[in-house]
Image (spheres, helix red, strand yellow):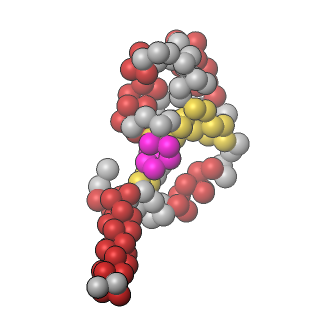
Amino acid sequence: MNKEDKYLFKNLQAFRERLHTKPTLFFDYDGTLTPIVARPERAYMSYEIHELLRVLTRFYNVVVISGRTLKDVMERVDIEEIIYAGNHGMEIYSKWFTMVYDFGGAVKILLRRLNNELKGLAEKYK
């Protein structure tokens, strides 16, 4: 992923265009594609589910959503035609487009605003 792909809305049009090519199916990884297990690192899809997803990609856009990191869910599913959403949708990847929410940048902006507000309050209540 290059630096220009870091911003969520940069590729929003490509995302919309892809979703309009055919119907889209959304699946959560944990608990939908895999059973809920006591140790999340042991949650793997069955061969049958993996092959079903592969077949579905011929007829539908298939999106796999997870709270896991994007890298983790992509490695576990490992089907090129799938659109992956990791970190609860903060990172989205497909072979057609990539979108990543710049969470660090958003936090910096909020912290600057908070800092300015606190400075103002400190001055006001000296």
The residue sitting at 57% across, 38% down in the picture is 63
Reply above or below: 76 against 66.
above
Q: Quadrant of the C terminus?
A: bottom left
Reply above or below: 109 against 102.
below
Depth order, front residue of 56/125: 125
Q: Is residue 91 magenta?
A: yes
Q: Is residue 94 left or right of residue 56?
A: left
View extreme (right): residue: 23
Q: Position of residue 110 (x, y in %)?
A: 38, 69
Q: Position of residue 94 (x, y in %)?
A: 46, 44
Q: What is the total number of numbered labels drawn onto the structure image? A: 0
Q: Is residue 53 magenta?
A: no
Q: Position of residue 1 (x, y in %)?
A: 32, 50
Kindly tell me whether residue 51 is visible in this rendering.
no
View extreme (front): residue: 126
Depth order, front residue of 35/47: 35
The residue sitting at 39% across, 20% down in the picture is 41
Q: Position of residue 105 (x, y in %)?
A: 34, 64
Reply above or below: 43 against 77.
above
Q: Quadrant of residue 53?
A: top right
The residue sitting at 53% across, 26% down in the picture is 30
Q: Is residue 14 left or right of residue 112?
A: right
What is the span of residues highlighted in magenta in the rendered image?
87-94
View extreme (bottom): residue: 124
The residue sitting at 34% across, 76% down in the picture is 118
Q: Is residue 39 left or right of residue 53?
A: left
View extreme (top): residue: 47
Q: Quadrant of residue 27?
A: top right
Kindly tell me whether residue 20 is visible in this rendering.
yes
Depth order, front residue of 25/28: 28
Depth order, front residue of 107/119: 119
